[in-house]
Image: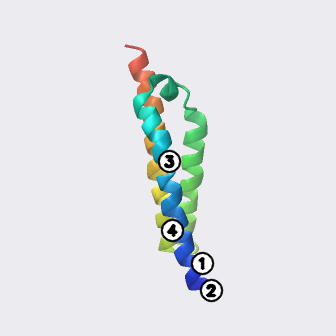
Amino acid sequence: MEQVLSVLYGASGIAATALYLPQILKYHRDRRARMSISLVAWSGWIAIAAIGVLYALLVARNPLVAAVAGMNIVAQLTVLSYGIAARFRGRE
């Protein structure tokens, strides 16, 4: 059972990361959508996920959990970068 749950956890992490793609594509196409990104909220979610990665690596010693959280951080950083870029480009 533990093996099945481990596989499901890894697969769900990949699925969760993939679910960011439609929103990222929207941000890529729509400047107004990029301007609506909350920099505070996304920064907070990234910080929380980073704590999860550290916990997985240093306490639980579970690289699978760390990798899943890390994949989500990459997607979250992509969203955050769109929000930041929209604000810098908006001042030009």
Quadrant location, the N terminus: bottom right
Q: Which of 62 and 15 is in front in this view?
A: 15
* Numbered mark located on residue 5 in the image: 1
User: Circle 4 — which element?
Assistant: helix
User: Circle 2 — which element?
Assistant: loop
Image vertical order of residue 81 relative to residue 33, above or below: below
Which kind of residue does numbered mark 3 sit on?
Tyr
On the image, the x and y values in percent for residue 5 come to 60, 78
On the image, the x and y values in percent for residue 74 come to 44, 51
Image vertical order of residue 38 relative to residue 54, above or below: above
**Residue underneath mark 3:** 20
Give the side of residue 45 with respect to residue 20, left or right: right
**Residue underneath mark 2:** 1
Which kind of residue does numbered mark 2 sit on?
Met
Residue at the spot 50% in from the left edge and 47% down from the top edge = 20
Cα distance, mark 1 to mark 3? 23 Å
Q: Along the polypeptide, which appears first: circle 2 or circle 4?
A: 2
Are there few (<14), some (14-19), or many (20+) residues within 10 Å of tag 1?
A: few
**Residue underneath mark 4:** 11
Cα distance, mark 4 to mark 1? 10 Å
Cβ atoms under marks 3 and 4 closer than 8 Å: no
Which kind of residue does numbered mark 1 sit on?
Leu
Cβ atoms under marks 4 and 1 closer than 8 Å: no
Which kind of residue does numbered mark 4 sit on?
Ala
User: Circle 3 — which element?
Assistant: loop
Residue at the spot 41% in from the left edge and 22% down from the top edge = 88
Residue at the spot 57% in from the left edge and 57% down from the top edge = 51
Are there few (<14), some (14-19), or many (20+) residues within 10 Å of tag 3?
A: some
Cβ atoms under marks 2 and 1 closer than 8 Å: yes
